[in-house]
């Protein structure tokens, strides 16, 4: 994309609730990827393939704002309707903004392109940006530690109806915001004790799959609200069937309307897994991709733990039998590896191979080994304490180990090194 400089003198004024400072000077484009984003509001026109992002940033002395823009074509950047200086640095935009003692909103108008490699807006109507493709959809920060609230408006669909949350009211990672377009039917699964409405959105030929996949979803969500803590992202939640194409399975944690592959829609465990991300991975964000197991390993354990509480006998046993089969394959040299690499910000989660079943399965085994040592209810309390302490913030696996030690009295560091930090496997299923 071309490098663009827009030069203009700004009039004195306030934006997004007031800048707290006069903006009667021109601020050159400056690199600052750390300025806190308070809210991201997106107004998307699917027919025109254009959008407006209103990015509310926190007070700061910095005069720079840098955002990822992938292959977006930015056409204007304004504050209070007045142009700001900005430069398109390829996959990043650098903007000159005034220093401020209160939040203010920068408006970015842009055009976007379709992406059919699970890296943006697909021609078939869904978005998927995990782990770092949000810039192909809106100006963003893709680091999993960053969080922002969202407001969404999506119009202009040629066929079907866009389905998305109008608001994500608590800080969320960038990959959580999403929409999907199709003709959906809403299957009401009831309310939890906390009043959260639970549903599954499916197509006309998927009613049986939705019923099977949602059989334990309301009860599971209720268990997590009662045992882990209040849900942060709205009062209506549920799974949305996503036609990702042949060979695609599982789901994506686009809370509060998370997407589940049509191929996995009938799998009750897959739906519970995505629901549990409302607490781990989303409710508590990851400090680094190295802490991926804090999201996926915790959620896989919870999938089994919750279904063992709320589903008929045998359902959770089949989930664990699947883990055991995968672990045996790893023990035989098929896909084993380190679930929790040390460091922070050193790896590419896709390019360096961490995105595999290893953090999922080894993580589940680690938590069950701890539960077998201290008791499941005691580990439940540790997870609840961790969530209460870190909700709305970014944390790492070391923070989880600290909480387990504090709440249970058991030092799980050696167990974590054996299950998560090593490419080998412990001899048995418990903590060594």
Image (cartoon, rainbow, N blue to C red):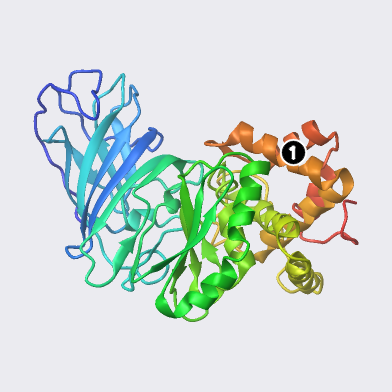
Residue 270 seen = yes
Q: In the shown orientation, is residue 140 left or right of residue 15? A: right
Which residue was labeled with disc 1? Answer: 381
Instruction: Residue 365 in the image: state x and y as whole percent.
Output: 78, 57
Residue drawn at x 54%, y 75% as measured from the top left: 209
184 or 119, nearer to the observer: 184
SS under mark 1 = helix
208 or 98, nearer to the observer: 208
Instruction: Residue 244 in the image: state x and y as whole percent.
Output: 44, 73
Residue 401 seen = no
Q: In this view, does 31 lie above or below 178?
A: above
Q: Is residue 54 above or below residue 362?
A: above
The quarter of the image holding the N terminus is bottom left
Instruction: Residue 185 in the image: state x and y as whole percent.
Output: 40, 69
Q: In the shown orientation, is residue 171 left or right of residue 164? A: right
Instruction: Residue 238 in the image: state x and y as whole percent.
Output: 49, 58
Residue 311, quarter of picture: bottom right
């Amino acid at each position: 994309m071309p490098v663009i400089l827009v030069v203009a003198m700004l009039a004195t004024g306030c934006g997004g609730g007031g800048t707290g400072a006069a903006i009667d000077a021109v601020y050159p484009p400056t690199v600052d990827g750390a300025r806190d984003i308070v809210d991201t509001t997106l107004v998307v026109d699917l027919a025109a393939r254009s959008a407006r992002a209103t990015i509310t940033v926190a007070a700061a002395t910095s005069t720079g704002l840098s955002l990822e823009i992938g292959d977006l074509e930015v056409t204007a950047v304004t504050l209070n309707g007045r142009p700001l200086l900005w430069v398109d640095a390829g996959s990043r935009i650098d903007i000159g903004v005034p220093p401020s003692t209160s939040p203010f909103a920068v408006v970015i108008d842009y055009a976007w392109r379709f992406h059919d490699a699970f890296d943006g807006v697909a021609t078939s109507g869904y978005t998927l940006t995990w782990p770092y493709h949000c810039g192909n959809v809106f100006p963003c920060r893709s680091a999993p530690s960053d969080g922002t609230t969202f407001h969404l408006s999506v119009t202009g669909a040629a066929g079907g109806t866009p389905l998305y949350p109008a608001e994500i009211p608590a800080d969320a990672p960038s990959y959580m915001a999403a929409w999907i377009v199709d003709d959906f039917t809403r299957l009401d699964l009831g309310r939890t004790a906390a009043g959260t409405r639970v549903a599954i959105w499916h197509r006309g030929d998927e009613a049986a799959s939705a019923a099977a996949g949602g059989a334990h979803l309301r009860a599971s969500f209720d268990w997590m609200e009662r045992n882990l803590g209040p849900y942060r992202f709205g009062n209506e939640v549920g799974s949305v069937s996503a036609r990702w194409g042949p060979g695609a399975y599982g789901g994506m944690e686009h809370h509060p309307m998370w997407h589940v592959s049509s191929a996995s829609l009938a799998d009750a465990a897959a739906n519970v897994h995505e629901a549990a991300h409302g607490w781990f991975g989303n409710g508590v964000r990851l400090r680094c991709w190295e802490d991926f197991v804090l999201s996926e390993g915790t959620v896989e354990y919870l999938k089994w733990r919750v279904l063992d509480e709320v589903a008929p006998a045998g359902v959770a046993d089949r989930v664990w039998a699947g883990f055991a089969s995968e672990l045996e394959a790893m023990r035989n040299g098929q896909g084993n590896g380190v679930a929790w690499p040390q460091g922070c910000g050193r790896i590419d989660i896709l390019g360096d191979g961490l995105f595999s079943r290893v953090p999922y399965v080894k993580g589940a085994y680690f938590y069950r080994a701890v539960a077998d040592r201290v008791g499941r209810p005691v580990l439940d309390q540790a997870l609840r304490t961790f969530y209460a302490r870190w909700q709305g913030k970014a944390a790492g696996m070391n923070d989880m180990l600290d909480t387990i030690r504090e709440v249970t009295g058991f030092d799980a560091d050696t167990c974590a090194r054996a299950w998560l930090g090593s490419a080998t496997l412990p001899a048995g299923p418990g903590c060594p």
